[in-house]
Structure formats: C-alpha cells, structure tokens
Image (cartoon, rainbow, N blue to C red):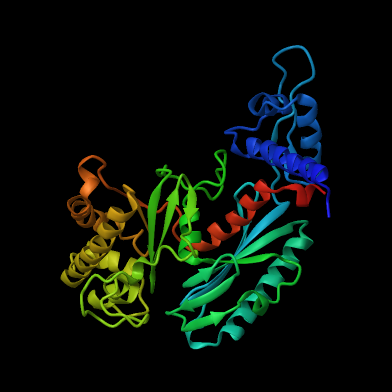
Amino acid sequence: MESPAVARQHSLREMNLSTVLRTVFDAEMPISRAQVAARTGLTRATVSTLVDALVGARLLLELPPAAPTRAGRPAIPLAPHPRSLVGLGLEVNVNYLGICAVDLTGAVIRRWVSPAAPASRSAPEVLAELGTRAREMIADLAERGMAVGGARLALPGLVRPDTGRLEVAPNLNWHDLDPVPLLGLDGIQVEVRNEAKLAGLAQTPMRAGMTAGEPTAQLPATFLYVSADVGIGSAVLVARELYQGQHGWSGEIGHVVVEADGAPCSCGNRGCLEQYAGRSALLRAAGLPSSGDPGDVAAALERGDERALAAVATTATALARALGDALNLLDVDAVVLGGIYAPLFEALAPLVAPRLNDAVLSSRWAPITLHRAPVEGHAALIGGAREVLRAVLAAPTRWTG
C-alpha cells in the first residue's frame, strides 16, 4: 500500500497532468507551454515537465513553431494528438449493432453499423457477434498505430453504471444480464451505459476547440435530451454533465403514461409514451410500412399527406404531455430532440412548443425552447467514445506512466 505522502504526491501529479491536458484541449487555438502556465498558474518548469510526459504518451502533439513576433525562441503550439488514442463506442439497439472509434481531436476514425434484429436473438449470441467485430476493429487500429483507451457499451434499458449490469431492456426482451464478459474484449476496459444518456452526452462538446464531428449548433449547457426510435429515452444534462439518478436509471421518459388505460406496452404497463410517439406508432399512424423511416414521413408531409399530418400531430400531443410533466419536475427550460424526432423537427416543434409553454408553470419567466439535436445518427456511439476520452482527460497518468 502506498504511504499517504506518496498517495498525495501521485494525486497532485494526476491533477496537474489533467489540468495541463484540459487546458490544451479546451483552447480555441493551439497554445504554447507559456500560455498553459499563464492560464493554469503552474510554473513554466512544471508545465514543461508535464507537457513532455503528455507528448511522450502521444496525448498531446507539438506543432511546427509559430512565426516569432519578437526576439527569442519561437513558441511551439500544442494540440491534441490525432490518431494516437481512441475511445470506442459499442451499441446494441433494437434494429442494429454498431461500433465507433473516435480520436482525441474528435474525429471519427472508424464506424461499423449493421442492420440486425437483436430482439429475436439471444443476448450471448448478439454480444458475441459485437465483440468479434470490435476485436477486428481494435486489431485494425493497432496496425495503424492507435491504442484503445477503453469502451462504452450502450444498451436500451435500465443499466447499473456502477456494476455494468443490465436489469431490463423491454424492447430487446433482455433482463438480469452481465453483458461485458459476453463481449470477450479481454484487456479493454468496458463500461455499460444507457444508450439515451450517451446520445445526450454526444450533443455536448468534448472540448471547446473541437471541430471534427462536433455539434454545429450552440446548445444551452443544461437541457433535457429526448431521443426516439423503437423506444424513447432521455438524458438530463446539467452544466454539460449527465444527471444519472440514484441508481443510474433516470430518463425513462418512454414509459411515462400519457393515456390512461391506453395501448399495452412492452414494459407491462399501458398508455406509455412510446406507444404513441415511438417509431412504430408514428409509421403505423402515417400509413407507412414498419420498415420505413422518418424520411418517409417527412416526404409524406411535404406532399401534404393527411395521414402523415395527423400522425405527427398525435406524436406532438403525446410528447408534449410527457415533456410538460418532466420539465415541471426538473426545472429545465430547454429540450433537445434527437433520434427520429430530429429529421421531423420542423414539423414537430411548432406543435410541441406552445403546448409546453402552456403546461410548464415556470415558462412565463423562463420560456421553453426546443432544439434539434446537432448529432443525430447513432449518437450513442459518439457519446460512448467521447466518454472514454473524457475519462482519459480526467486521469491521464495511466497513459503517461
């Protein structure tokens, strides 16, 4: 066991490494060691030593010296190191499997998404396939000189983030499951998260200076993210940090009852939001095949199709009921719509917004705003990979040695 003095020294080094690393990552433009020292309050000698360790670990990259503006040695700008360390996002959803690798600059290096029907297959079979594909991607990344900093597995259900256990995923018909061993990713730290929470996290920038793969819209720092596919999930972001709830189960807005004694739901209840505002309900109400997608609904709306217009109106009514209750409880005044709602945003927002401002008591003083999710397709994969990299920023000692 380390002595208290050694432990304190280790903690101080970890904190200082993280501070320097975050300062470079959060800079709008590449900055020098001297600028890092000025922004952090650390001495130049300390910053130089820490930067050397971070450059040696390929977390930071030294760029060509900037043109000198005065006498003396030209400043060497620092930036996140591209294609060195990557975070891996894994996902099992109702109708697809996916893997995504994101590097420290925020660039998506590799992505694999396969249409599948996990709900009709056993969990061991599905997770074994996902693990095989992940090992293939990891091997390919290693051949190209990249290391994997860890992985996040996104699942559509109640997940205990502290233990990695899936309690239940109604739309997959999975329950009481320990999924990580079934992946077979030995040597890679894998943590399990709810897919909607990771998709919500994908809507926030990992770093201020990021451009590749970043949201183009400026969202509030605090918002309720709601994403729909077969199921409907949500995430609460407070100052760009996830609110998990006591057990990590917050955000199950798809199972908020919006119609008393309504349609039966896969969760065992009746009248849940996803039975009126999920993908299947929307397509069915619009008179479209279950294999369709939101683009088909959008096209029907452009044609003025009455069934599509009615379907979107029904979705908006149900969504506004659930959101109104949630916003009254949470004291949040911004909603970000993702998943199948994003491509239908222009049709949904004018129907949902006035209902919310009527339903939310505080809207007179803090009007509710609706935003289209800037990261739409397979957002949980992006969010999972970014969460891995955020963990590296918080604790880089593992990589610096």
Q: Is residue 224 above or below residue 187?
A: above
Q: Quadrant of residue 26?
A: top right
Nearest the eye: 156 or 314: 156
Q: Is residue 291 visible?
A: yes
- Extreme-top residue of the structure: 71
Compare residues 331 and 184 and report the one nearer the observer: 331
Q: Residue at x 74, y 24 (%)?
A: 75
Q: Is residue 167 left or right of residue 369?
A: right
Say if 12 sits above or below 346 in the image: above
Q: Position of residue 305 (x, y in %)?
A: 18, 69
Measured as percent of width and height from the top left, residue 316 is found at 23, 63
Residue 83, percent across and down? 70, 51
Position of the N terminus, as image quadrant, is: bottom right
Where 162 sits versus 179, above or below? above
In screen coordinates, is 6 left or right of 15? right
Horizontal side of residue 276 vs 394, given as left or right? left
- Front residue of 4/229: it is 4
Is residue 114 shown to the viewer in this render?
A: no
Q: Quadrant of residue 183?
A: bottom right
Residue under the image location 31 percent in, 58 percent down: 326
| Displayed quadrant of residue 176 | bottom right
Q: Is residue 176 left or right of residue 223?
A: right
Q: Residue furthest front?
A: 4
Q: Nearer the viewer, residue 44 or 386?
A: 44
Q: Give x and y (percent) for residue 21.
A: 68, 40
Q: Give above or below for 392 relative to 256.
A: above
Residue at image position (29%, 76%) is 275
